[in-house]
Image (cartoon, rainbow, N blue to C red):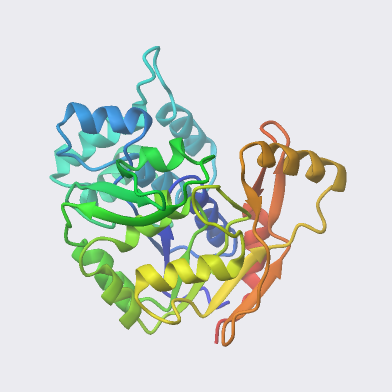
Amino acid sequence: MNKELKVCTIGGGTAMPIINKGLIKAGFLNIKSIVTTFDSGGDTGRIRTDERGKVLAFSDYWRSLMSLWPDGNQKQIWEDMLRYRDGRGRNFGNTFFQFLSEKEGNLGEVDELFESLTGARLAGEVIPVSLKPANLFFTTISGKEYKGENFVDDLRMSKDVIDKMWLEPLVEANPKAKEILKNADLIIVAPGTTYGSVLPNFLPKGIIESFNKSKAKKIMFVNIFAMANEIKKATVLSYWEIFKKYLKTDKPFDMLVMADLEKLDKKMLKKILFYYGLENSSLVKMDKINGVKLLKVDLAKIEEANMRLRHSEEKLGEFFSKLEIG
């Protein structure tokens, strides 16, 4: 794939950084990474509560920013430091980026200050999807209503599937995020918690219009597993229908990419499937969707320490190097 393409990634959580690292391994050095800013769980939630909801969530921002810093000793030291938690569970990374955001006036201006402080040479930049704080609200098929992104994860084993999600207040999208979508050659929607890390990026006012009007090729990486509260039927087609609904278009993506698990160790895979089953999570099954290219590629790896399947940045690097999007 042409390394001069204007590449934009969209997402959050732990999966977005893996996509960014895969792109860097493939030689892309000017990645524009749009991230959600509505997280409300853990230490991020504590900060937002302490600040009366008047600050953005920093966690997805700084994790994506660190993923754009090519590997090296200096990066590792900073990564360890930013992940540090004290005895009360307070995360240094969130506190540090809260300080940088206040110093610069908004989170969207932090990249350059971070580079000057650390000596990092980032392979792109991170763009908050909105510069205004807001809360995620959602209802489930039983009619229950929840306030806060943290409940998406807290209820991940519930079969009371999420039915509708929105922002309050309905904030404007970051103008820079809209401009980047407009000018991109390739837009990659990362895997991740559908209602926690991915779809929230499409809720601010104006972002859907910019995404749909973009002439870029659009690729979505399908999750390996579906959480119980995300979807009734764990199929690619079910996810396709969700994104059609929220992005308000019949064809939100030109290509869907699934992880092929055939080359993984069968004995370990069986164990991992058992543990996911205990969480009511289901392996996403492949469908055919008319007019959409669907690739099934060896992209996954086994993390034995926590019995999880993840996308592999090394395999993603190989995939992006060979991908043709013309």
Residue 148: where, in percent of width, then height? 30, 41
Residue 201: where, in percent of width, then height? 33, 59
- The single residue placed furthest to the front in the displayed view is 142
Q: Is residue 264 above or below residue 76?
A: below
Quadrant of the rendered image containing residue 176: bottom left
Residue 162: where, in percent of width, then height? 42, 52
Quarter of the image for the C terminus: give it: bottom right
Q: Is residue 2 above or below residue 224?
A: below
- Compared across the picture, whether 52 is left or right of 186 comes to left
- Compared across the picture, whether 131 is left or right of 144 comes to left
Residue 28: where, in percent of width, then height? 50, 65
Q: For the image shown, how many numbered marks are present on the structure?
A: 0
In the rendered image, is residue 311 in sight?
Answer: no
Quadrant of the rendered image containing residue 174: bottom left
- The single residue placed furthest to the top in the displayed view is 87
Quadrant of the rendered image containing residue 48: top left
> Is 12 or 271 nearer to us in this picture?
271
- The residue that appears at 17% across and 57% down in the rendered structure is 171
> Is 30 or 98 nearer to us in this picture?
98
- The residue that appears at 35% across and 57% down in the rendered structure is 164
Quarter of the image for the N terminus: give it: bottom right
In the rendered image, is residue 100 in sight?
Answer: yes
> Is 30 or 60 nearer to us in this picture?
60
Q: Is residue 307 above or below residue 284?
A: above
- The residue that appears at 35% across and 49% down in the rendered structure is 143
- Compared across the picture, whether 108 is left or right of 273 comes to left
- The residue that appears at 84% across and 47% down in the rendered structure is 265
